[in-house]
Amino acid sequence: MTRVFIIMLFVLAAVEVNAQEAEREKIRTIELQKEQEKSRYVRQQMDSGIFYMNQEKYELADSKLRYALSNLKSIPSDLAFYFGKNSYFLGKYKQSVDWLTKYIQLKGTTGQYSTEAAQWLKMAEKELVAEHASQSQNAVEVLSRDYTIDCGPAGRVSCPVCSGSTVIIRKDYLHGETYRTCPYCNKVGTLSCEDYNKLLRGELKPASN
Ligand SMILES: [Zn+2]
């Protein structure tokens, strides 16, 4: 009699554990769905930002793209491109150069928008030089170092310090050209996404030798 009772207790406990597990699973599913809905919405905002940019409604495009910047955990390369391009139209040339450079760093010359990005970058740099000359600068700009950049499926980026060559060449009046191993990419010419983001924030420490 006692044995049966104990077995029944075990069974009840097991049922209880199962019910709790099922409840947790349900909550996890709901949270996941919420997350997916949110990211769908953010993606929609980004797409409508691109749409408005193409409609030459640059301010509206800016607010949509900035919403996407602020609500994505890491920034996809195409958003860097579109935000950089739209920044050009807004006359925010430093911001434009910053994000277009980021796109090119991430995608190299073979990205979907690499050619276009290089063209806009060249124009933005020209405007930036002119702006520096006339000393009129935009006070507040949204710069990429404040965001975590998504490096794509490869998860590595060509080292921007040595352009992937692993060597830094310094031209010096006294010594001519001197060669030094790039202290950032550990002789491989690429950075992990984590290190790349640290570099952007100025937090990546160079190796001492
Ligand atoms: Zn390097």
Image (cartoon, helix red, strand yellow):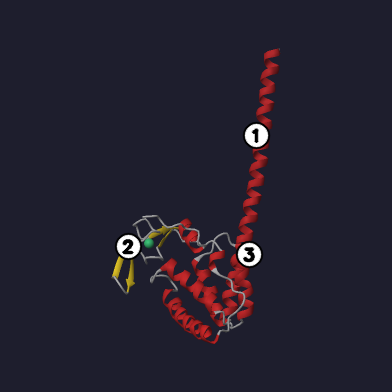
Horizontal side of residue 99 vs 14, given as left or right: left
Q: Which residue is mark 2?
A: 180
Q: Amino acid at mark 1?
A: Asn
| Ligand 1 quadrant assignment | bottom left
In this view of the protein, can residue 51 be seen by the observer? yes
Q: Amino acid at mark 2?
A: Arg
Can you tell me whether the CB of the residue at mark 1 lies under 8 Å from the nearest atom of ligand 1? no
**Residue 166 lies in quadrant:** bottom left
Q: Amino acid at mark 3?
A: Tyr
Q: Position of residue 111 (x, y in %)?
A: 42, 70
Report the front residue among 114 and 176: 176
Report the front residue among 173 and 182: 173
Residue displayed at 63% across by 59% down:
37
Q: Which residue is mark 1?
A: 18
Q: Position of residue 68 (x, y in %)?
A: 60, 67
Residue displayed at 59% across by 70% down:
46
Q: CA distance from mark 2 to mark 3?
A: 47 Å
Report the front residue among 147 and 40: 147
Q: CA distance from mark 1 to mark 3?
A: 35 Å
Q: Which mark is residue 41?
A: 3
- Mark 3, secondary structure of its residue: helix
Q: Position of residue 108 (x, y in %)?
A: 40, 69
Q: Quadrant of the N terminus?
A: top right
Mark 1 Cα shell of 10 Å, populated few (<14), some (14-19), many (≥20): few
